[in-house]
Image: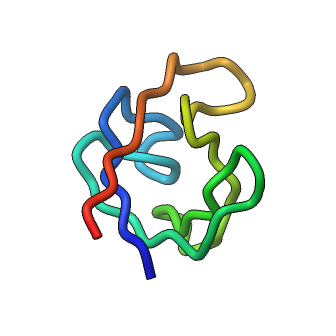
Amino acid sequence: MMKLKYIGETFYDGLGLTNGKIYECLGEEGPFYRVIDYSDEDYLYSKTNPAPLDGSSKGGKWKIVK
């Protein structure tokens, strides 16, 4: 299983992605990674700019760590 480090603005009050946190990636689906976030649910996040759909954060980027 791949691990990804999120680098960018934290969003969804700690229930989404947090800057510097390492997340488990369940796989790739087209232009998205399927990631288990703080909600303990898996969601699709953009490979190039993971950000909330509501535009409340500018998002960030991923760094593959494993």
Which residue is depicted at the point 73% across and 25% down?
54
Left or right? Give the position of 30 relative to 34.
right
Q: Nearer the viewer, residue 66 or 9?
A: 66
Left or right? Give the position of 66 relative to 2.
left
Percent across and percent down for residue 4 are 37, 58
Query: What's the coloring here?
Result: rainbow
Percent across and percent down for residue 15 are 50, 53
Q: Nearer the viewer, residue 33 or 40?
A: 33
Above/below status of 29 relative to 63: below
Q: Quadrant of residue 31?
A: top right
Q: Nearer the viewer, residue 35 or 63?
A: 63
Left or right? Give the position of 48 relative to 13.
right
Which residue is depicted at the point 50% across and 69% down?
25
Above/below status of 50 relative to 57: below
Above/below status of 49 relative to 23: above
Q: Nearer the viewer, residue 5 or 58?
A: 5
Which residue is depicted at the point 29% across and 61% down?
22
Of the 4 image quadrants, the one containing the C terminus is bottom left
Which residue is depicted at the point 31% across and 52% down?
5
Percent across and percent down for residue 48 are 55, 32
Query: What residue occupies the far bottom of the structure in this picture?
Result: 1
Q: Quadrant of residue 65?
A: bottom left
Of the 4 image quadrants, the one containing the N terminus is bottom left
